[in-house]
Image (tube, rainbow, N blue to C red):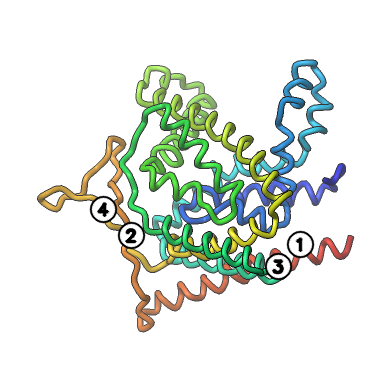
Amino acid sequence: MRAERTFIDKIFLIIKGLFMGAANKVPGVSGGIVAFVAGFYEEFIYSLQKINLKAFKLILNGRFKSFYRYVNGQFLSLLIFGMLVSYFSISKILDYFLEKKELYVWAAFFGMIIGSIYYISKDFGHWNKKTILAGLLGLLLGISISFLNPATENDNLFFIFFCGIISVSGMTLPGLSGSFILILLGNYVLLLVDSVNSLYDTFADIMEGDFGFINNSRRLNTLKILAVFTLGSATGLVTLSHILSFVLKNYKNITTAVIIGFITGSLGVVWPWKKTIYKTDALGNVLIDSNGNEVIVNYHRYIPDLENPESWWAIFYMVLGAALLLGLEWYGKYRKHKK
């Protein structure tokens, strides 16, 4: 790990955090892919691994500077800062475009994932019986997850804590979308939309000197859910990082093969041409959950109509997404070579 970073390096790390945070919020897209492609995945995992018993002993003994150096604090704090800013800025912009230009957004992400598959696999020269089998298992797992049906919303706090652990899988496992897993568990809207918006509204109220939310039981309950979810996420982030650091050290080639297969298999999740299937009652009315959101059952994927100009625009954004990702990869190599 690098001990010192230039000002430009720090800015780029925050930007990477912005992209990672935005990717984590999009169903089917993994923030871990951003880390993998941008070249800081292993540093991210190994830094999280340092949050262990020794780190807590340093805190208890008041050795905060030693703790900061031990856990690679500069790297983690800048990256996490970028992710937090993303949740209240880029991700909100992303929410807007997903609502207004959903096809083009999914097309861009589909292209970016295609680019990431190319990036990860182009220099992987360790294919053998074990890695091919691992890649096929990853492929089957990715395809299987793509076609699972979502569950209904559940605000039980133990389940919310479990969702928190699951949600960070997208940060630590490239290709596994934590937000998509939350959709399957039925809690995507509750945890990544309603809860985040409640926290944003609460901060806005406090800045205006308005503390009326204290008497808003629904707002307080949502904030409590967000707190439990955050605790679960922190627990999952540290726990998964320890497991992954061991796997990366001892089974790096097999792990990479699984990741390549899994990302390829999960392409179905972000296939741009799909229609949402909602849960309905006996009369055909769309069911609404306790938070006023339509209940999603699954997605109907279809082949694009090439006579429709919108399809060609989507293909353009798909190519643009792949080019953007590969361009970032090229720029990263260029900067590294100049140094």
Q: State whether residue 140 is above or below residue 296.
A: below
> Which of pointers 3 and 2 lies earlier in the amino acid sequence?
3
Residue 238 horizontal/vertical position (percent): 63, 35
> Which of pointers 4 and 1 lies earlier in the amino acid sequence?
4
Amino acid tagged 3: His
Amino acid tagged 2: Tyr
Amino acid tagged 1: Gly
Residue at 67% across / 56% down in the picture?
Answer: 36
**Where does label 4 land, which residue?**
278
Q: CA distance from mark 3 to mark 1?
A: 24 Å
Whether residues under marks 3 and 2 lie with C-beta atoms below 8 angstroms apart, the answer is no
**Where does label 3 land, which residue?**
126
Amino acid tagged 4: Tyr
**Which numbered mark, 4 or 3, is in the foreground of this view?**
3
Task: Tell me which corner region of the image, top left, top right, bottom left or bottom right, holds residue 51.
Answer: top right
Secondary structure, mark 2, is: strand
Residue at 72% across / 23% down in the picture?
Answer: 56
Secondary structure, mark 3, is: loop
Task: Tell me which corner region of the image, top left, top right, bottom left or bottom right, holds residue 97.
Answer: bottom left
Please state if 304 lies on the left or on the right of 333 as rendered: left
**Where does label 2 land, which residue?**
299
Secondary structure, mark 4, is: strand
Residue 294 horizontal/vertical position (percent): 28, 47
